[in-house]
Image (tube, rainbow, N blue to C red):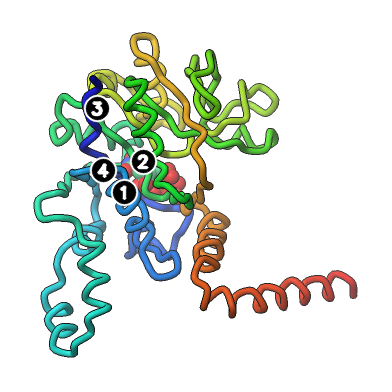
């Protein structure tokens, strides 16, 4: 039987430079999609997959993330006194169980691989999940839940992938597939970080959700800097691939890269449209904007 996936790492130590000046004092992960910080969506996805413990790898200026997942005594007492039951229940629903989170510091943002390595003692000798907290996934069933279901059958390492247009492959990590496992999943034979245009082995992008075996930590500890002068997770995964199986999962759903302005804005629209009351106002507003653009273009 495969060891269960009980723990997840959420690396939140990056600088968020693409969102400056918004991210000068507020972490990127705390920017809001409709009414929740980005990171809350990711924690909810992990909990819906049965994750029992979340290890946040934080950095300087990220303490507000720890506060967000803590009890807010003054606020909750005031809500109680004012009988704001609905608001209180909402806070309770999103708060992790006591003792189910850990926070460790990546002292300098040396790269995603290094951030994951910083969580090695919290994870220990068991398979675990990684969720990149600036990617949120809109799906009926939690994306990580879909991955855990596949892992329960296959074991090994699992990577969530998503189809993208061929002309965008040079911007992402791309997998090369080998034998098919089922309609949504195949074995992975290789992966490349940002392949030169026209050289990508597929149009399947690595989406920011991984299930990995703990042997990745030894590889990360030996690994030097890779692309962009950073310690890359992909390089260690490629090394691990020579010893262990990797499978892809084309999950049901759609990802939004909230680390980019386009992804962030489109996530706000897509998640906003899920709320029927908001959708009633948003739809005519968007129609007006499009109509206005058309008129300007026609003039
Ligand atoms: P990104 O490269 O997308 O995030 O890393 P970033 O560096 O914060 O953003 P930009 O490019 O400057 O705008 C993906 C995830 O990995 C984390 C980031 O916090 C982000 O959630 N990360 C990245 C770390 O925790 N440590 C690092 O050294 C690098």
Q: Secondary structure at mark 2?
A: helix
Residue occupying the point 38% across, 9% down? 242
Mark sitting earlier along the chain (2/4):
4
Q: Which residue is mark 1?
A: 48
* Marks 3/4: CA–CA distance: 14 Å
Q: CA distance from mark 2 to mark 4?
A: 7 Å
- Name which of mark 1 and mark 3 comes first in the sequence: 1
**Contact check, label 3 and label 4, Cβ < 8 Å:** no
Where does residue 204 sit, x and y in percent of width and height? 57, 31
| Residue denoted by label 4 | 50
Mark 2: give few (<14), some (14-19) or many (20+) Cα within 10 Å: some
Residue 282, given in percent of the width and then of the height, sits at 60, 75
Q: Residues within 10 Å of mark 1 (few under 14, many from 20)?
A: some
Nearer-N-terminus badge (3/4): 4
At horizontal 36% and vertical 20% (from top left) the residue drawn is 154
> Quick check: marks 4 and 1 in contact, CB under 8 Å?
yes
Q: Which element carries disc 4, helix, strand or loop? A: loop
Label 3 sits on residue? 127
Decide: marks 2, 1 in contact (CB < 8 A)?
yes
- Element at badge 3? loop
Towards the viewer: 293 or 33:
33
Residue at the spot of label 2: 145
Give how far apart the Cα atoms at labels 4 and 1 are: 5 Å
Taking 241 as reference, is 262 above or below it?
below
Mark 2 and mark 1 lie on one chain; the one further toward the N terminus is 1
Q: Residue at x 57, y 73 (%)?
A: 279
């Amino acid at each position: 039987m495969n060891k269960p996936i009980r723990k997840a790492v959420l690396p939140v130590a990056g600088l968020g430079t693409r969102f400056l000046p918004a991210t000068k004092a507020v972490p990127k992960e705390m920017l809001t999609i409709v009414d929740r910080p980005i990171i809350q969506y990711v924690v909810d996805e992990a909990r819906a997959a049965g994750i029992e413990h979340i290890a946040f790898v934080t950095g300087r200026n990220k303490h507000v993330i720890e506060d967000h997942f803590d009890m807010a005594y003054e606020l909750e007492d005031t809500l109680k006194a004012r009988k704001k039951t609905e608001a209180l229940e909402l806070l309770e629903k999103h708060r992790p169980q006591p003792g189910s989170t850990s926070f460790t510091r990546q002292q300098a943002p040396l790269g995603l691989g290094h951030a994951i390595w910083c969580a090695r003692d919290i994870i220990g000798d068991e398979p675990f999940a990684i969720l990149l907290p600036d990617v949120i996934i809109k799906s009926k069933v939690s994306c990580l839940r879909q991955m855990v279901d596949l892992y329960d059958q296959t074991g090994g390492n699992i990577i969530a992938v998503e189809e993208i247009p061929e002309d965008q492959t040079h911007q992402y990590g791309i997998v090369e597939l080998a034998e098919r496992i089922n309609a949504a999943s195949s074995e992975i034979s290789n992966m490349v970080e940002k392949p030169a245009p026209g050289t990508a082995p597929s149009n399947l992008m690595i989406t920011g959700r991984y299930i990995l075996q703990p042997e990745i930590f030894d590889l990360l500890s030996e690994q030097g800097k890779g692309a962009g002068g950073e310690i890359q997770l992909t390089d260690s995964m490629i090394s691990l691939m020579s010893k262990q199986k990797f499978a892809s999962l084309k999950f049901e759903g759609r990802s939004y890269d909230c680390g980019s302005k386009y992804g962030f804005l489109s996530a706000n629209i897509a998640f906003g449209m899920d709320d029927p009351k908001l959708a009633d106002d948003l739809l005519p507003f968007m129609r007006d904007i499009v109509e206005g653009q058309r008129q300007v273009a026609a003039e």
